[in-house]
Image: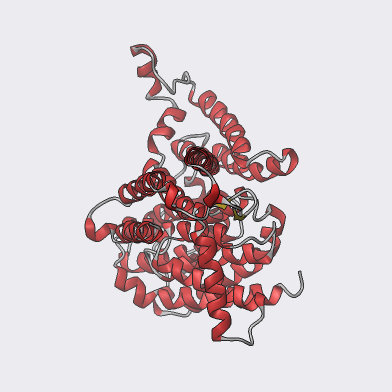
Amino acid sequence: METLLIVIFVLGYLAITLEHNLKIDKLIPALAMMAILWAMMAFGIDGFTSWFDSGKHALLDNFGALGHEDKMHLLEETLLHHLGKTSEILVFLLGAMTIVEIIDYFDGFATIKTFIKTRSKKKILWIFAFLAFILSAIIDNLTATIVLISILQKIVNDRNSRLWYAGLIVIAANAGGAWSPIGDVTTTMLWIGNKVSTGKLISYLLLPSLICMLVPTFIASFLTPFKGEIEVEDATPSKSKFGARMLYLGLGAIVFVPIFKTVTHLPPYVGMMLSLAVVATFAEIYSQTKISISSVNHESDAGSHHSPVHSALTKIELPSILFFLGILMAVAALESLGLLFNFAEGLKQGIGLIGTELEGTEVSDLVVLILGVGSAVIDNVPLVAASLGMFSEPLDNPLWHFIAYSAGTGGSMLIIGSAAGVVAMGMEKIDFFWYLKKIAWLALLGFIAGAIGFIAMRFFL
């Protein structure tokens, strides 16, 4: 039965990675895979001999000796446990996405365009690289990529030049998202899962992530596409007089979330809901319209179309939310049977046999680097979800920070390896093989340089 479950997961995952070829949105196989896996586990519960206790992070003793009713009760408890942990991530993302859309409702991101005065291609490259690195740490790498490419399209008219800029933005955004607990879905998963803390994550990963961004940007600045000048149009002011104010308020509200968690020790989604409430309140005041998220009559329904909160809720990426639900719960199914735990042990032993002179830490580093390279081929979300079931190291162990770095930045090596890359591919119609030829080697150099920096820093922290 375990073999059949693994086959179903592999087929479902293959459908996810080939969504562009199959013309099927990846959320469909993710949700189907999740439902089928848990259904088969329920039907074949009596045939399983092991069960993984996520709370104790160890295999459950005497699982095979339990009766059918006890096993079903345990399955239901485990399903509810994983749904709760997954929901924490999803609610957090919903709040963050809504705040970003409220900022966009007031055209707040147009404020950033006013900062760019130069015509030098090289200077514009560095400006966008640092903007991507910083913004992605605050509003996540996916949103930062969307915002910056939208601004880029208004500044750089030549499409060929924009492709190069977009490629470097993807690298910088993924690097920036790796060192922030709210910068990437994977780091958010590790943060909410109590594997990393905000302070340690920043102290361990800020410098390696910065190296990962600086190395490819520095090399690219000497390449032909970034030589010379471009024609920069005069910056147009924000369409709303509250644009800049809402930008700073929204970004400040998102940055407040880690502080709220540190002070109250409550899950991050609680702080995000508070931040959303504050931003939404000011948004409604500035728009001078009545809040109406759910309409009960024609009058309120008419007013809701002018509500920034209602408008933001209609624009958030619900397909992405459902995809995360499906893939995280599917991985949880494999974790519950102890398959990920056993796979991790086998992988460690296998690498140890290949190089018997390697110590435990070096074996773990090699495993994590493999995960990082793998995130370029397949989505990094399930890889990190799998790592949560593969390793049992305590909070803020360097292993978790290295996983955050590798999974977050490794995806830059292919255009389909990260959410930021996929959205850039869609916005600028970037060809897979063009990116592979022009940008992938820069991302690889940055990934390796940052990894070396992290390993070197570990001896001093």
Indicate how the structure is coloured in the image: secondary structure
x then y, percent, for residue 133: 55, 60
Quarter of the picture containing the C terminus is bottom right
Confirm whether residue 100 shows in the render: no
Q: Nearer the viewer, residue 163 or 258?
A: 258
Which residue is at the far left? 22
Asked if 58 appears above or below 262 in the picture, the reply is below
Confirm whether residue 6 shows in the render: yes
Q: Nearer the viewer, residue 91 or 423?
A: 91
User: Does residue 254 appear left or right of residue 197 in this picture?
Assistant: left
- Tally the numbered discs: 0
Quadrant of residue 209 in the image? Answer: bottom right
Quadrant of residue 416 in the image? Answer: bottom left
Q: Which of 149 and 58 is in front in this view?
A: 58
x then y, percent, for residue 336: 51, 52
- Which residue corresponds to the image point at 63% horizontal and 63% vertical from the top-left? 401
Q: Nearer the viewer, residue 460 or 120?
A: 460
Quarter of the picture containing the N terminus is bottom left
User: Does residue 398 appear left or right of residue 295 in this picture?
Assistant: right
x then y, percent, for residue 324: 43, 48
Asked if 125 appears above or below 102 in the picture, the reply is below
- Which residue corresponds to the image point at 72% horizontal and 44% vertical from the top-left? 262
x then y, percent, for residue 321: 42, 43
User: Does residue 138 appear left or right of residue 79 in this picture?
Assistant: right
